[in-house]
Image: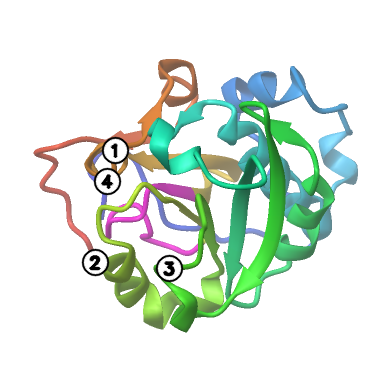
């Protein structure tokens, strides 16, 4: 378990919605219309997760050669059964780093030669997590998931419920090993940043 900060989901009433932590909420509201937290529910929680994924991409930088491909697009690939998939489809065609976003679902057997710059791994793939991450290795592919312990086990960005708020944890070591770069402004609103030399419990 992480020392100092808890990254596991906390128990909460089924009817309650976990609002964003205030620093993260302020950051997200720079781009997203506000909605009263008290009126939000699980579907809205997933919408915020999808919005976070989209906004985060503006602060992630890939090696130039990675994005030098036909179509001038950035591919977001979704692996597994997750309600976030259909919500991510809403950003199809929008632009990040002057590249058109393309969203598609993939199977594990299509990795790593799938042309993905981003892979969102649904919580349904928890039993295949290590296999997926090992397959991607140190390739410049941003890995994101809302499954528990994702960042501690080598995933790059984990969306979590922390202290009854939506937040995210970044495994900076994994990001740097892949050749990607994340702006400091994004790291500053992360709930936790795992760095090289971190010897935290991976269970």
According to the picture, the residue beneath numbered tag 4 turns out to be 174
Front residue of this view, candidates 67 and 70: 70
Front residue of this view, candidates 191 and 94: 94
Q: Residues within 10 Å of mark 2 (few under 14, many from 20)?
A: few
Quadrant assignment, res 81: bottom right
- Check disc 4 and report its element: helix, strand or loop: helix
The numbered dot on residue 81 is none
Earlier residue among tags 4 and 1:
4
Front residue of this view, candidates 83 and 93: 93
> What's the magenta region?
147-158
According to the picture, the residue beneath numbered tag 2 turns out to be 203
Q: Main secondary structure of the magenta part?
A: loop
Find out whether residue 184 is within the magenta segment.
Answer: no
Q: Where is residue 175 shown, x and y percent of the image?
A: 32, 40
Q: Nearer the viewer, mark 3 or mark 1?
A: 3
Q: State whether residue 127 is above or below residue 87.
A: below
Earlier residue among tags 4 and 3:
3
Q: Residues within 10 Å of mark 3 (few under 14, many from 20)?
A: few
Q: Nearer the viewer, mark 4 or mark 2?
A: 4
Earlier residue among tags 3 and 1:
3
The numbered dot on residue 113 is 3
Q: Residue at x 82, y 58 (%)?
A: 43
């Amino acid at each position: 378990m992480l020392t100092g900060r808890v990254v596991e989901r906390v128990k909460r009433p089924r009817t309650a919605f976990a609002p964003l932590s205030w620093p993260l909420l302020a950051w997200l509201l720079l781009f997203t219309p506000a909605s009263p937290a008290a009126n939000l529910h699980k579907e809205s929680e997933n919408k915020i997760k999808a919005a976070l994924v989209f906004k985060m991409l503006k602060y992630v930088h890939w090696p130039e050669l990675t994005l030098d491909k036909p179509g001038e697009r950035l591919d977001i690939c979704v692996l597994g059964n997750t309600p976030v998939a259909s919500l991510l489809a809403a950003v199809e065609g929008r632009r990040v780093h002057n590249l058109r976003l393309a969203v598609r679902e993939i199977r594990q057997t299509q990795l790593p030669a799938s042309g993905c710059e981003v892979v969102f791994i649904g919580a349904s793939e928890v039993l295949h997590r290590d296999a997926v991450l090992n397959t991607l290795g140190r390739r410049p592919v941003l890995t994101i998931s809302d499954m528990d312990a994702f960042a501690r086990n080598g995933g790059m960005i984990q969306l979590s419920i922390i202290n009854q708020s939506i937040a995210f944890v970044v495994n900076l070591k994994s990001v740097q090993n892949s050749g990607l770069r994340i702006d400091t402004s994004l790291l500053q609103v992360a709930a936790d940043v795992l760095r090289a030399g971190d010897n935290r419990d991976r269970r």
